[in-house]
Image (spheres, rainbow, N blue to C red):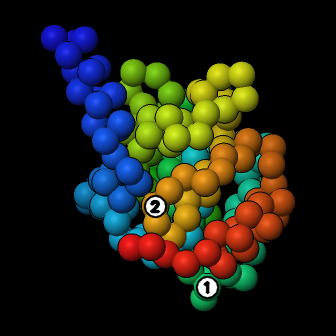
Amino acid sequence: MLASARRFVSSSFAAMSSVYGITVKDAQGKDTNLEKYKGKVLIIVNVASQCGLTNSNYTQLKELLDQYKDQGLEVAAFPCNQFGGQEPSCEIDIASFVADKFKFEPDLFQKIDVNGDNASPLYKYLKKEKGGTLIDAIKWNFTKFLVDRNGNVVKRFGPTTEPKDMKKDIEAALAAPAKL
C-alpha cells in the first residue's frame, strides 16, 4: 500500500504544472489554494524566529515587499521548526513577533515540515521543481523559492542568499507577462 501511495504522490506532482494546484493551511488553519497568487510574483520561504538569519531575512523581505508589492510581488511565509528547534512558537505568536519586531505582515501559513516523510506537499513540489546543490533537501531556515506570475518555480535561493540579492530575478519575473 505504501508503494502505491508513493506512486500516486509522484504521479500527482508529475501532472502538476504550477503551484496553483496546491492547497495549504493559513495561520488560522483554513485551507488556502495558492491559486490566490495567480498573476502575482511570489516568494515562498520557510521561516524561523530564533535563527541567526531571522533579522536580515525578515528586514529585507519587508523591504522587497514594500518596494515591489504594487507591481505584483507577494511573500508567503511557512514557519518550520525542523532546523535546531528555531521556530517553537505557535502561528499567533509568530505573526505577532514579525509584526512587532519588523513591522512586517507577510502571508503567514501554518507551521510545516519541509523535509522528511511529513514534508508539506508544497515543499515536495518545490524541491522537485528546483533541486538544491548536492541534495534536494531544504538545508536550513530561509530557503527561498521565486515563483513567476504563471505559478512556475523559476529559481531557488539558499538560506544565506540575502533577499536583497534576489532583486534582479524579482524584477525579471515582474517584467514578464502572465500567460494565464
Q: Residue furthest front?
A: 179
In the depicted view, which residue is nearer to us: 58 or 6? 6
Which residue is at 55% across, 30% downward?
82
Mark 2 belongs to which amino acid? Gly
Secondary structure of residue under mark 2: loop
Q: Distance of mark 1 from mark 2, alpha carbons?
A: 16 Å
Q: Is residue 106 left or right of residue 1?
A: right
Mark 1 belongs to which amino acid? Gln
Residue beneath disc 2: 151
Which residue is at 30% across, 61% downward?
32
Residue 148 location (% of width, % of height):
55, 64
Q: Is residue 51 left or right of residue 147?
A: right
Which residue is at 51% across, 70% downward?
149
**Is residue 145 visible in the rendered structure shown here?**
yes
Residue 127 location (% of width, % of height):
53, 36
Dot 1, how many residues are within 10 Å of its Cα: few (below 14), some (14-19), or many (20+)? few
**Is residue 102 visible in the rendered structure shown here?**
no
Q: Which mark is residue 175?
A: none
Residue beneath disc 1: 71
Q: Is residue 69 above or below residue 6?
A: below
